[in-house]
């Protein structure tokens, strides 16, 4: 599930293909991956990266990314909203609560 909401422009998109088209106008890559693993809140970085390895390898290779990191957060994490807006991509757990995020580092952007 994906939602793109830009309240000050009265934009709210729910369809993944519409979101992808909208973001492409701004040269923002958007994709959704799935895996067969159901994560709980204790899943490690290695477990998550391994579960998405097939998609990660081709994405990182094509984009020239050097590494991928995972953090676990929840609503009680200090600076929760700030973390959500700082370039981390949510992975939804079985309960549907955002708690796992991927972050990609470009060799040129850091």
Image: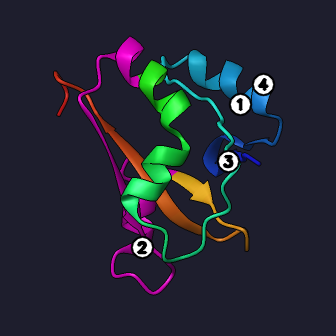
| Residue receiving disc 3 | 5
Determine whether label 1 and label 4 are within 8 Å by CB: yes
Res. 63 image quadrant = top left
- Secondary structure type for disc 4: helix
Question: Residue 66 location, x and y as percent?
Answer: 23, 29
Residue positioned 58% across, 55% down in the render: 91
| Residue receiving disc 1 | 19
Residue 58 visible? The answer is yes
| Residue receiving disc 2 | 80
Labels 3 and 2: the sequence-earlier one = 3
- Secondary structure type for disc 1: helix
| Residue receiving disc 4 | 17
Mark 3–mark 4 Cα distance, whole angstroms, equals 15 Å
- In the displayed structure, 40 sits above or below 50; it is below
Determine whether label 3 and label 1 are within 8 Å by CB: no
Select label 3 or label 1 by which is in front.
Answer: 1
Mark 1–mark 4 Cα distance, whole angstroms, equals 5 Å
Crowding at label 1, few (<14), some or many (≥20) Cα neighbours within 10 Å?
Answer: some
Residue positioned 47% across, 46% down in the render: 50
**Is 5 on the left-hand or right-hand side of 49?**
right
- In the displayed structure, 80 sits above or below 5; it is below
């Amino acid at each position: 599930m994906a939602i793109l909401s830009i309240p000050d422009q009265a934009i709210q998109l729910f369809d993944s293909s519409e979101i992808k088209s909208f973001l492409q106008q701004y040269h923002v890559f958007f994709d959704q991956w799935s895996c067969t693993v159901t994560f709980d809140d204790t899943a490690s970085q290695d477990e998550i990266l391994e579960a998405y390895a097939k998609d990660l390898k081709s994405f990182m290779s094509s984009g020239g990314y050097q590494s991928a990191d995972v953090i676990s957060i929840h609503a009680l994490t200090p600076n929760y909203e700030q973390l959500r807006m700082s370039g981390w991509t949510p992975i939804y757990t079985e309960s549907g609560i955002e708690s796992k995020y991927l972050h990609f580092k470009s060799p040129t952007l850091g």
